[in-house]
Image: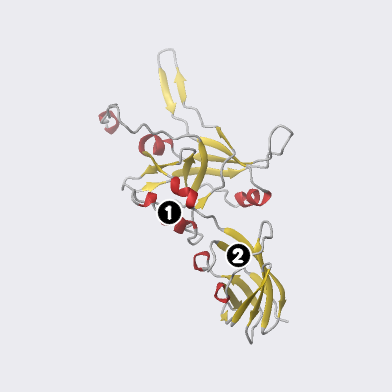
Amino acid sequence: MAECNVRRKNFGLVNCNTLPGLISGMITTPEDFKVTDEQTALVATWQNAMIASLADRIYYWPPFAQVENISQEATYEDTPLAYLPIQDGNYRFRFSISQNLCIHKAMFTHRSSQGRAFLYDRNGMLTGTRDANGFIRGLRIQLLHTEKLQFNDGSVSTKSPLVLALADNVELDRDGVIFDGSFVNSLERIHDVEIKILSAAANEIVCTVKIACDGTPLEGLESADFVLLDEAGDAQVISSATDDGDGRYTLSGSGWESGTLGLKDVDQLSLQYYEAEVATVTIT
């Protein structure tokens, strides 16, 4: 049997005594996201993945304010004649983030029972796993589940808890890998923005573009950043866009019909990094 012929590795001392430190953040990825050893240190590799299409996008979570190890313990059968292993247990954590209600609500959209996660520690290292082909991947997720707010009770601050359960302890215990994650300090997260239509005519649309969470005006957009479609999904030409200040824009054109107004994909905008849902435009 194969398990009876395991090649036992040796314990010679080495110069690299690296273990995961206190977990302070994570990057969640789709199941198929992977990088080479050379790519792990390239900021562009990770930043490009953060602004990829939704199906391929990775997410660098806000920093953790608290970490609780709730891992499943190994279980054994204890008989008068033997002490026998049943299962190894598994890695589970409860992380807490202390940011704002917008972040709390955004976290709930990430509930999942699939995908992978790289764990980031206070020493600036990322922990993942190496697959059979030599690529580095995150640790497979069994459950990523947000919990209700932990309210300030006079002794602790308000926090947004979430539980991360890993699917397979063998990934870390057998194939785990730790690498320099200092690049994460250079990563920029996407901001959700909201477009509101103030008025709409066949030759002019006045709108505001602001950060969805706190209403901060987004200034500096160009006409090419806007996407105006009719109800059939066909593009309508915007001849100019005037930044009126305070997030207010006046778009000019001719012969427009009712439809939608949005922004280009996040990786094509003249400003970095913003993403908006489309707004309904009713021409009057």
* Amino acid on which the number 1 mark rests in the picture: Val
Please give the residue where the numbered disc 1 appears in the rendered image: 43
**Up-down relation of residue 250 to residue 156 (above or below):** below
* Total marks placed: 2
- Where's the N terminus, which quadrant? top left
Asked if residue 111 lies left or right of residue 83, the reply is right
Which residue is farthest top? 80
Q: Which quadrant of the view contains residue 151?
A: top right
Alpha-carbon span between mark 2 and mark 1:
24 Å
Q: How is the image coloured?
A: secondary structure
Q: Which mark is residue 169?
A: none
First reached walking from the N terminus: tag 2 or tag 1: 1
Residue 238 location (% of width, % of height)? 59, 81
Mark 1, other Cα within 10 Å: few <14 / some 14–19 / many ≥20: some
The local crowd at label 2, few if under 14, some if 14 to 19, many if 20 or more residues have their Cα within 10 Å, is many
Residue at 57%, 63% in the rendered image: 275
Instruction: From the top left corner, tell me how far across and down residue 149 is, in percent.
Output: 68, 42
Residue 276: image tag: 2
Q: Is residue 225 left or right of residue 16?
A: right
Q: Describe residue 62's horizontal placement relative to residue 153 as left or right.
A: left
Report if residue 245 is visible in the image: yes
Q: Nearer the viewer, residue 172 or 20?
A: 20
Q: Amino acid at mark 2?
A: Ala
Note whether 137 is above or below 249 in the view shown. above
